[in-house]
Image (cartoon, coloured by chain):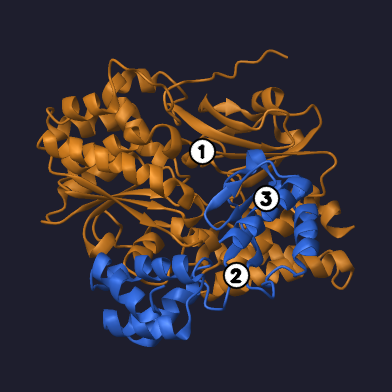
Chain colours: A orange, B blue
Amino acid sequence: MENNLKKVDIIFEIDDKCTPLDVVVKTLKRPADEIILDLIDSGLKGRGGAGFPTGLKWKFARNEDSDVKYVICNADEGEPGTFKDREILDRVPEKIFTGMAICGYVVGAKEGYIYLRGEYNFLLKPLTKKLEEYNLFLKKNNIDFNIYLKSGSGAYVCGEESALFESMEGKRGEPRNKPPYPTVAGYNSKPTVINNVETLVYTTMICRIGPEKFRELGTKDSRGSKVFSVSGDTPVPGIYELELGMPLHEFVNEFGDGDVKAVQVGGASGHCVPRKKFNDTIIGFEGIPTGGSMMIFNSSRSMYNVLHDYLEFFAEESCGQCTPCRVGCQQLLKGIEAVKKGERSPAYLDDLKKLTGTMKIAAKCGLGQSVGNPFNSIIDNFREEIIY
Amino acid sequence: MLTTEALVKELVEKNGKTRNSLMPVLQGIVQKEHYLSEEALLSVARELDLSAADVYGTASFYTFLDTVPRGKNIIRVCKTITCHMKGKDEVIKVLSNALKVKVGETTHDKKFTLLTANCLGWCHKGPVMLVNDEIYPDLTPQKALEIIEEYAKEEKKA
């Protein structure tokens, strides 16, 4: 079969003639509104998973009237199957810092924070050193922006932006009600831009290569490229930057082991796509969006074990604040165990599916709302494996 | 070694006497004392002028901010799906046998605590474990054992 999968080299590319330091100095000479227009033109959407247009986010924060604003880099990469941000933080941190500094200039913020998950504490030392050098560079160039490093302590839900602010404010990482959105009231209740690690790097690169080059990649609804974390039953696990909008079957041809049964797109909170749907599934905002996690399962894997693993994960990581999520996650887990043991009839699975519907509308944040994604896609496609 | 109270004072001094400093202060204590004792939590509450319940509430939320005694070396084996598929159970089994503890327990000599963790972000190199802040990818049961033996040796030297 022909393979059109396009590999891209933007995120990790190193150009000695135009370093991230050059980019920040050059870009900050341009009018802020022009930078926002470029970002909007580029079509860049958030790479953490939610996919909010980055240019608009910056514009909203810029339009807020406040003496104090913040830029936050969300490096609380906790979605199972995702490890691209760690690699970016390790290999091209200056590109992240530059994205933050440009954002600070555009929205009028003087402080930036990187919230690094506790599981990546081994990166604290090298990042601190590189940050010191970078902050010094900004100071020497009279750029009034300083970046600080904050560390998480092992809570998946803190990747949710408002929970992350709570954590930075010294509280339990419990998501807030929205609105107000972060661009209005985020960290310390001040206007805040919070972007994923990868998104910030793309802003740096769009400032360097121009929005047109970025737009050329991808599709109408999913512009540009994206870093994918590929794991599971694949001979070539690792990190790959690929053009968005690819059909899943092309991805499987490239990365599968020849015996692929299903791909979990978007991590534990994403969707499970069975083999029969590979041909008509697009990876992108018009199909299945993803923060980059692609977990491949071959025919030797039990999808009951996969779902059980995910539900155990959610039951543990639910912050417990709202009832639909706290109780829902536990009941889903107990429910599939009961069906497996024969204590409940297979029809009980349909009741559990209804419960995920309730969670979707009643849970406070994305965690509880998205548990139905893996649950329903696995139950619908591999029902017999859950029952027998 | 600093007393807990002195340590808390030092951390509050360094991070600032505000609620926003609570996480770095608690993290600093865990780094030195491996868990948050009642004494430490009360001392933080006093120094940051917060209620003890507030401090405990925050601490108990986070997996890495333990409020029960832990060993000097905390082992966290990733248990999420890809590490599961690549054999984390065998790694846990061999560590559990060698240390003579179950998951969640601490050795009698307080040198090691064996825990599991949710996705550590190394799915392409599983199974994987953290020992304190150090990461060990591409594990086999044998490799995991050797790593722990190294830590035990370091202990003897120290």
Q: Which mark is residue A84?
A: 1
x, y percentage for residue A232?
A: 71, 39
Q: Which mark is residue B147?
A: 3
Of circles 3 and 1, which is in front? 3
Along the viewing direction, whichever of A30 and A340 lies nearer the viewer: A30
Query: SS of the residue at dot 2?
Result: loop
**Distance between mark 3 and mark 2 Cα atoms:** 16 Å
**Quick check: marks 2 and 1 in contact, CB under 8 Å?**
no
**Quick check: marks 3 and 2 in contact, CB under 8 Å?**
no
Callout 3 environment at 10 Å: few (<14), some (14 to 19), or many (20+)? some
The picture quadrant where one finds residue A40 is: top left
x, y percentage for residue B143?
A: 73, 45
Q: Amino acid at mark 2?
A: Gly
Residue at the image point whose x is 82% and y is 49% from the top: A302
x, y percentage for residue B77?
A: 66, 56
Q: Is residue A36 visible?
A: yes
Residue ID for mark 2: B71
In this picture, residue A156 sits left or right of residue A126: right
